[in-house]
Amino acid sequence: MSGCGNVLFNLIAAVFFVLTIITGVMVVGIMAGEVEPPFFAPEPTLAVPTLASIEQPTGVFIPTFTPSSTPELSPTPSSTPTDTPTLTPSITLRAAATAAPFVPEATETPAPEGAEAAALLPSPTLAPPTATVTPSPPGPPTATQSAFPFIVQQGTPLMRENYANPSGCNWQGIAGQVITDRGEAVLGVQVRITMPDNSEQFTITGTNTAYGPSGWEVGVAAAPTTDSFQVQLIGTDGAPVSAAVQVAFPGSCQENLALINFVQTRPVQ
């Protein structure tokens, strides 16, 4: 029994060995392009269909139908009420596009005569007068020119409460400073104060620096008064080098100091 089994196994092994060789040959043939799959499929054959002949029976009438090339279609009016507003704007637009524009008839108006014609004439246009500008001569403005080399600074005399003299309200006086038009202090200029009784008091610029480097001060009363005074600058020859400035006090402690500044605009001759 064992001998028969060995023969069977050997036969199966031989069959698989042969199949392996055949498979390897096919693979090599496919790779070389000699063999194309499928290998054992039958070649397709084309079957030619046979047309059966149909014999028409004799004696039988077959009617033919020829359709009309121009069928007439009966328009069917739509019963839906919405069709009417749809067609109305289309007809209106076509009529508006083709309608001729309205041209009003020209009416002939008689021309006015006499006074009416004169009133309708355009008024003549008058050209505005041309302003003639005369250039000013070169040099300082005429408004700053003065007969004296010193002028009163704008904004002075200025009345205020005494702030520099220790007497406070028990004092009344006139003070200020003298500078050039470039703001430089001018020292050594004599200041003359004419009193109400025509008496005079003098001081020199630079003697009271509480009012500036060229400051000066003159006390005119021991209490506030309503008196008036004159202030003027005097040159070294005794001639005035500025105009006389009138100062009137109101008689109150809040305005018992009169500040006056002078500005030198040109050298003293």
Image (cartoon, grey):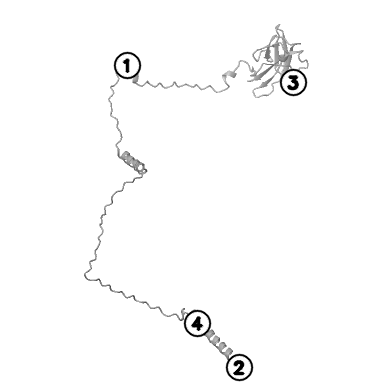
Picture coordinates of residue 187, whole percent (x, y): 71, 20
Q: Nearer the viewer, residue 265 or 127?
A: 127
Mark 1 — residue?
A: 115
As measured in the structure, the alpha-carbon distance from the residue carrying label 4 to the one carrying label 3 is 131 Å
Mark 1 or 2: the one toward you: 2
Mark 4 or 3: the one toward you: 4
* Among numbered discs 1 and 2, the one appearing first in the sequence: 2
* Among numbered discs 4 and 3, the one appearing first in the sequence: 4
Mark 2 or 3: the one toward you: 2
Q: Secondary structure at mark 1?
A: helix
Residue 217: which quarter of the image? top right
As measured in the structure, the alpha-carbon distance from the residue carrying label 1 to the one carrying label 3 is 84 Å
Residue 67: which quarter of the image? bottom left
Mark 3 — residue?
A: 210
* Among numbered discs 1 and 3, the one appearing first in the sequence: 1
Q: Extreme top residue here?
A: 197
Mark 4 or 1: the one toward you: 4
Q: Nearer the viewer, residue 27 or 217?
A: 27
Q: Secondary structure at mark 2?
A: helix
Mark 4 — residue?
A: 26
- What type is the residue that disc 3 sits on? Ala
Other-residue count near label 1 (Cα within 10 Å), few / some / many at <14 / 14–19 / ≥20:
few
- What type is the residue that disc 4 sits on? Met
Residue at 32% from the left image edge and 18% from the top image edge:
116
The reply to whether residue 116 is visible in this rendering is yes
Task: Look at the numbered discs 1 and 3 and tell me whether their residues touch, using CB distance below 8 Å.
Answer: no
* Among numbered discs 2 and 4, the one appearing first in the sequence: 2
Image vertical order of residue 12 relative to residue 91, above or below: below
As measured in the structure, the alpha-carbon distance from the residue carrying label 2 to the one carrying label 3 is 152 Å
As measured in the structure, the alpha-carbon distance from the residue carrying label 4 to the one carrying label 1 is 129 Å
Image vertical order of residue 253 relative to residue 22, above or below: above
